[in-house]
Each structure stands twice: as C-alpha cells, then as structure tokens.
Image: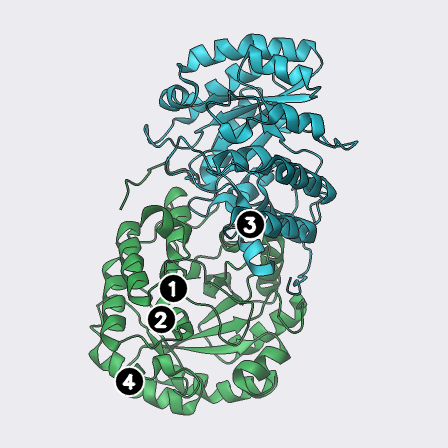
Chain colours: A cyan, B green
C-alpha cells in the first residue's frame, strides 16, 4: 500500500459529528457475484469488516436460495459467524418463512425491501407494490413483537430503468407506508445511481415534512453516474447520519441492468475522514480487506480510493 | 448508446444559474498520454468539443517540446484549428518564448501555471516558487498589454505528494501572488485529488477574504479518491461558477505519481444537468466524443457516465 496523503481535516457547519456506516458488502455486494463465494471467505470478510471498526454489517439474506443462490448458506453462516459485541448484523428477510429462519438464527435486526415503483416491485418481488406492503406487514409486526429492529429498504427512489423519473410524492408515499408498518429505519435507495443533489435534498425535505424523522433515514447511493458522494454530502447537509456503503464498491442489482456499483465504503470514508466526521472505521484496514476480496473475486475493486491506495 | 435516464431536474438554492466548463482534455488530458496522438485526431477532438457546445477549450501548450512531446505540434494545430466564433481556446505558456509563439499564433487567452508548494515548483518548473512567479511576471504583463486574458493555474492546493498537507494560508498567499501579476482568472487545483468539501470551502473563503473575487476563480479537481464531484458541489455552494473538467476523464499529471484522472466532464455534466444549472454543453455529444477518443487511445474512459452510457 502506498503512503497515504493526510490532508487537513476541515469540517462543515451543520454536518453530523458522527455517521453510522451500514456496510452492505456481504449481502448487497456479494449477492450480485455470479460465482458462489466460499463460506469461509464470507466469514473472513465479515470478521475483517468488524476488525476495521464497522458496527452495522448486513450479513446475509433469507430470500429463497432459488432467487439468490449466492446466499443459500445464510443459516450456516449465521451459525458460524463470530458475532462481536457492539456489532449489529442485520439480515434480509422477504416473508414469514424468512423471518422464522432469522429468528431461529438469533438475529437482532432484519431488513425488508420495498419498491417506489410498480414495475420494480413486480420484477423484484413478483407482486404489486400494495401486495408487497401487505406481505411485509405481518413480518414487521412479528419481528417488532420479538424485539427486533427492522430496516426498510426502498428501491428506485430517484429513477427507474423501466418507468424513468419517479415523482417525489410517489416515493414519499411508499416510504410512509413502510414506516407505518413499524419499521425502525428507512434506507432510501438510488438503485440505478441517477440522482443528483437537488433531488436528494427535495426528497429528504418531503419525507421530513411527512413526519418521518430523518434520524431514522439512511441513504443508499450507487455510483453508476459518479454522483454517490455528492449526493451523500447533500444528505449529510440535511441531517442524515446513516449512510449505506459497500466495501470496495462491491455489488449492484441483478434485476436492474443499468445498476452498477454501490458507493464504495472507502470513498465515503475518505470524504468523512476529511470532513472530521467520526465513523469509527479504519480506512487502511478496509482498503486491505477490499484488496483481499478483489483477489478472491479475481477482479479489481471499482473504488477510486482502493485503486489509489491498494 | 443505451437509453438515458432522465431524472427530475431539481435545483439547489444559491447555486449559480450557469456554470462555464473549462474543457481541459486536449491539453491537460492529452499531455499525459505516452503515445503521441495524431494532429488530425486532436483537431477532430477540438471540433467535436466545440460541436458539443463547449465555449472554453484549452487547446494546447507552448511548453518546450522536450518536456511535453505530445504537444510539440502546438503551432501547426493552432494554424489548422477551425476556431469557432464564441469559443475561446486558451493555450499554456511557460515563458517569454512561449508567449511569442502564442502571440504569433493569434491566441486570445493564455494560461500560466504556478505551484502552491516549493517541491512541486521545483519538479514541474525547475525553479523555486518565487523564481517561478518572477518568471511569469513579464509574461503576464506583456500578455495583458497585448489584450489577452490570462488564466493562472495553481497546483497542489490541497495536498502535495512530497510535502503532504499544504497550509491554506500558504495556498492563498501563492494565489494572491499570481493574481497580483494581473491574471484574469485563477484555477485552484487539487492536483492529486485528496481534497474534501470542508477544505474546499475553507480555501475559497480565505481567497475571498483576501480580496480575490470568486467570480474569477475556477476549481480544478482530480477524481483520484472519488471526491471531485462532492468538492465541485461545495465550490458551487460558495458561488464558484467556472469548473475545469476533462472529456472522458482524460489526463493526470506526469510529474506527480499519485495524480490520476481529471474530473470527467460527463460526470460533472450529469450533476449540473440534474441540478438545472445551465452549461450549454450537450451530454450525449460529449459521451460520443469520449467513446470515439477512447477507441483512438485504445482503452476505456474512466468516466462513470461514459461507462454507463457509452
């Protein structure tokens, strides 16, 4: 690893002092890999992410293995995972069966996933938007009764490959429906990476105006058009302090052709470190992890920071 | 080219209504290519950039050909260039000899290049900072007397590969010296791409406090660590309305190992288009140009937007 430049840390009035990064590499990242990654590699990946200081790591998914064969080992992974004190490991849960498996595995937090558009709901969930909300309602209700936290992903918030632009009002209504189920956190996703900062700010203002507490809102940007970090800055300026990112920029979405590349955690960290925003995550350890994972996957990380330092 | 998503155009209070992009691909971009590009390709590149709507295109350089062999054809290029009405074609000029050649070629605008650090001044200009300012003084003076506009580049404003962090005061002092020579524009460069938004804002505030009109200040970001667009947003929020970028992300700096990749004009345009900021530049034409140039150079563009749309 080459010597790292250490520019001034200079903050920005009104930004959060601390940001929680939701590291989505092990689930959102790996599920898009065509070659199945060994369980041992996944476990080492999770260990390395915790070693780097992550406290919120999306571990795996209980979506049916027929849909996401990469994560068919969810049960075994959770049984073997060395769960660190102070680290949360949410898992994706699509339905009652998934919740049963998650509860049996002793998870503390689940994530459900809705869509802001009809077309993507049908492509990703095989049902209409309202049917998907109805499907999630008893899952969220039971999970909350069992004391679990529930994150709700909302996809296609800023554009949809089939429907094009997505009206802000439609997105905010879909968000409100998910939060009304009792979810504890909402992750607003730019699944195809088209958003620009004005859109981000307008949507967050609408959510806040609808009574959704921005303390409960995370942003989930993709870097398809290079906009992820500028959008993150816009979200931070609105008071958001939970940001999703994927180590090394792993991932995308297998059902949306133009979706490539989650925001790389390293690129996010460079910005936050420079702004003096605390995260608790060590950049050098994370870069080493992504270099190691890139070797396992057989191709370089798309993260600019990993390319520069790795 | 795949269908382009058209998300909402949603602005941001206080951003400039219009941004002038200084397209640096033909000079700053190409000078870092190891293989010499044919004059005919350069001329077509310049034509395509003007066709796309650019009005400020850095055309070439009168630095001695021993230093930048790629641009040894500057004189012939300017003689053959179809200079469009309403388009300015600044050229880089290092000294009195360069200015003579530029004047003979009938240019309307030149650019000089200083450094915020001693080490880079010695590496890039083979003299101390103060010696380089003394060298440029008569060049700027004569150029201004001849009615030319003079852009001053200032490199290493946010970090230096040899010196590490660069104090803001040192950068602002170096900027003041160049502007005191009579330059009409200052381009603040993050040559190695390490800056984060708080630094950008702090430096711009200091320049403004020193009496430099931000209407005369351009920002020149590199995307080495993925920060260029977030830094651009920060600069726009400060009122800057001239942004340097390179079609397809061509370029870097041959004398600074860790400097890779200028901000790609396409990635910048995606942000500005989304924010409703006018530029007059057509994204699709620019993407086509960068795809065409990538074929000539034999490798893909690093621009995220070109990769997504090209």
Distance (Cα) linking label 2 and label 4: 14 Å
Q: Are marks 1 and 4 on the same chain?
A: yes
Say few, some or many: other residues with alpha carbon within 10 Å of mark 3 (under 14 / 14 to 19 / 20 or more).
Answer: some
Distance (Cα) linking label 1 and label 3: 36 Å
Say few, some or many: other residues with alpha carbon within 10 Å of mark 1 (under 14 / 14 to 19 / 20 or more).
Answer: many
Secondary structure state at the residue bearing disc 3: helix
> As drawn, is A269 to the left or to the right of B286?
right
Q: Which residue is mark 3?
A: A294
Secondary structure state at the residue bearing disc 2: loop
Q: Are marks 3 and 2 on the same chain?
A: no
Q: Looking at the image, which residue is at 30% across and 41% down?
A: B4
- Depth order, front residue of A248/A270: A248
The percent position of residue A172, horizontal first and vertical second, equals 48, 22
Q: Looking at the image, which residue is at 43% across and 23% down?
A: A116
Is residue B86 visible to us here?
yes
Q: Which residue is mark 1?
A: B22
Secondary structure state at the residue bearing disc 1: strand
- Depth order, front residue of B5/A70: A70
Distance (Cα) linking label 3 and label 2: 38 Å
Q: Are marks 4 and 3 on the same chain?
A: no
Say few, some or many: other residues with alpha carbon within 10 Å of mark 4 (under 14 / 14 to 19 / 20 or more).
Answer: some
Q: Which residue is mark 2?
A: B58
Distance (Cα) linking label 1 and label 2: 7 Å
Question: Mark 3, chain letter?
Answer: A
Q: Are the residues tagged 1 and 2 within 8 Å (C-beta)?
A: yes
The percent position of residue A191, horizontal first and vertical second, equals 45, 34
Mark 1, mark 3: which one is toward the viewer? 3
The percent position of residue B213, horizontal first and vertical second, equals 51, 64
Question: Between disc 1 and disc 2, whose residue precedes?
Answer: 1
Question: Mark 4, chain letter?
Answer: B
Q: Which residue is mark 4?
A: B75
**Quadrant in which the C terminus of chain A is drawn:** bottom right
């Amino acid at each position: 690893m080459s010597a790292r430049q250490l520019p001034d840390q200079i903050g920005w009035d009104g930004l959060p002092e601390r940001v929680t990064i939701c590291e989505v590499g092990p689930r959102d990242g790996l599920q898009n890999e065509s070659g199945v990654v060994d369980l041992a590699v996944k476990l080492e990946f999770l260990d390395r992410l915790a070693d780097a200081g992550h406290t919120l790591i999306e571990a795996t998914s209980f979506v049916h293995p027929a849909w996401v064969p990469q994560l068919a080992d969810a049960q075994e992974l959770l049984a073997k995972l060395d769960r660190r004190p102070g680290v949360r490991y949410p898992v994706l849960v699509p339905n009652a069966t998934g919740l049963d498996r998650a509860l049996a595995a002793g998870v503390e937090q689940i994530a459900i996933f809705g869509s802001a558009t009809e077309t993507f709901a049908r492509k990703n969930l095989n049902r209409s938007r309202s049917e998907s909300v109805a499907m999630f309602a008893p899952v969220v209700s039971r999970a909350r009764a069992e004391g679990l936290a529930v994150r709700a992903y909302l996809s296609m918030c800023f554009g949809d490959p089939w429907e094009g632009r997505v009206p802000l009002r439609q997105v905010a209504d879909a968000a409100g429906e998910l939060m009304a189920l009792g979810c504890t956190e909402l992750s607003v996703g730019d699944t195809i990476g088209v958003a620009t900062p004005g859109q981000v700010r307008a949507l967050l203002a609408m959510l806040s105006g609808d009574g959704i507490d921005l303390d409960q809102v995370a942003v989930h940007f993709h870097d398809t058009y290079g906009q992820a970090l500028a959008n993150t800055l816009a979200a931070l300026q609105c008071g958001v302090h939970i940001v999703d990112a994927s180590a090394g920029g792993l991932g995308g979405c297998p059902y949306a052709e133009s979706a490539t590349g989650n925001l790389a955690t390293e690129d996010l960290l460079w910005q936050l470190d420079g702004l003096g925003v605390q995260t608790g995550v060590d950049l050098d350890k994370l870069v080493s992890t992504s270099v190691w994972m890139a070797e396992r996957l057989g191709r370089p990380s798309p993260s600019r920071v990993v390319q520069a330092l790795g």
